[in-house]
Image (cartoon, rainbow, N blue to C red):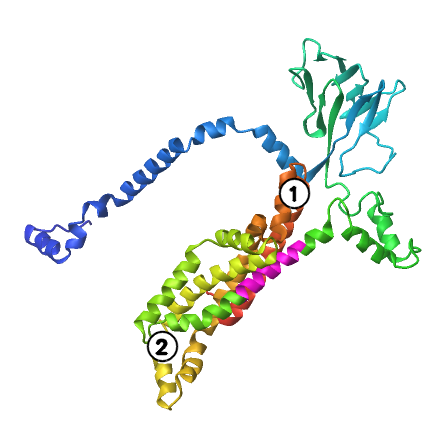
Amino acid sequence: MSSSFILNTAERERLTAAHPEVFNRSFMQRYGLLVGLLAVTAYLVGCFFLFNVGPAFMQGRWDRASSYIQDWYSWRAQPRLRFEAGKVEPQWSSRGQYPVDAKIDWLQPLPDGGYSVVYVGSENRLDVTPTRVDVYVDGKNYPVMINDDGVVAPQGLPAEIQQDGKKVLVHYGFAGQAEIRTSQVYVQRRFLGWANFLFDTKSEFWGKGYGELAALALWEERLDPARSNLSHMVDDFLDNSVWQHADILSKLMQTLVMAFVGTLFGTVVALPLAFIAARNITANRAANWGMKRLFDFLRSIDMLIWALFFTRSFGPGPIPGIAAIFFTDTGALGKVYAEALENVDDKQREGVKSVGASPIAVNRFGVLPQVLPVFISQSLYFWESNTRSATIIGAVGAGGIGLKLLEAMGTNADWDKVAYMVLLILFVVFLFDHISNSLRSRLIGKTQH
């Protein structure tokens, strides 16, 4: 059995008159979502052409980007095999991945004074002499001749070998590459991991396995009678001349101090100023307006701009960073605090005021207990956020690990060190986020979802 409900004309008119917002919707109510989607699409298309996004992607050096990413989780040995007095002389970079006169399994001397550079087994290697480089790709030899006019590769080259003007480029994928010139062969040999991360080549612990290091630290005889092996390891680790652990960790602590002190000063100054800005606390419209405009001024100038300003005033170091965080947080926290004060329950204030308490006592016992958990929660959030921001402003001269990070990126060869510092920053941010969330949950309770 089926039934149907049919409205007559009078009923339709009555419902239309009673609920016009349902039956007589405006154009934007009907098609607003579609219009919004079309506007966003048009905006994105305009930005694509206005900022030349397509050509930028087409002209990007993606091969270079891939190399930089590989540098984050691997290291490169980069000897220059120079041609001097009819012989090949290896010249190493300043990072010193190997000790002097070390025996290197992938770089072996040849009887005629040359060197053999092994990439992926003996079938993929370079045999380097001052007048000729035999390039082996999958076991097949491609002789590259060297003379005063340039470097000449043979015909029928595979994709791994390229003639680039007067030089020849050889690519062996992740294992590395080589650049053959008239005066030298620039070798890049890549390996997974970070070279000499624990100890540099000057340390007595260099080259030892984890088992040997554990034995030395726990029960074997001291290498230095004046100190334990464990203390010796810690000193050598911190004094690592390549990775500079002591300097990086001290700069990280400097960044944390900048974030903490700047946030603390901002909180201490913003708290009393917020009482002046709140209209229900200070009955003076001129004072309210002036204080809120001061907060707007302080927070409208970005922290990075403040850092540049104070760096010019005080010079590089943590003081400009602390001052930049202090100024920005004073404005931002002052605004948040003032808004919280303007929304307090006046019943508690009136109750304290009714017993004849002074205005300071009224605010202390009638207002502050209501807003203090919110104030502390906001300050903790800003402290957590400033831990990240302190890294950025450090890069413009305000000290801390940000400046160290910028220096490593500027060399264009220390991307593994960049990855190390980024991981340290991530660890600290995750740790402080956990601490901040724990403290906020204790103060204002856990949010129920």
Q: CA distance from mark 2 to mark 1?
A: 53 Å
Taking the magenta stretch, the answer to whether it contains residue 343 is: no
Q: In which quadrant of the rendered view does residue 294 lie?
A: bottom left
Q: Residues within 10 Å of mark 1 (few under 14, many from 20)?
A: some
Q: Nearer the viewer, residue 19 or 149?
A: 149
**265 relative to 90 in the view: left or right:** left
Report the residue that reaches farthest toward the top: 155
Query: Which residue appears at 62% of the width and 35% of the height?
Result: 68
N-term mark: 2 or 1? 2
Q: Secondary structure at mark 2?
A: loop
**The residue tagged with tag 1: helix, strand or loop?**
helix
Q: Residues within 10 Å of mark 2 (few under 14, many from 20)?
A: few
Q: Is residue 422 visible?
A: no
Q: Is residue 242 above or below residue 226?
A: above
* Residue 140 circle label: none
Residue 291, percent from left and from top: 38, 67
Q: 2 or 172: nearer the eye?
A: 172
Q: Residue furthest front?
A: 313
Disc tally is 2
Q: Which residue is mark 1?
A: 408
Type of amino acid at the residue the image marks with label 1 = Ala
In the rendered structure, which segment of residues is drawn in magenta?
251-264
- In the displayed structure, 340 sits above or below 85; it is below
Instruction: Residue under label 2, please give it.
Output: 345
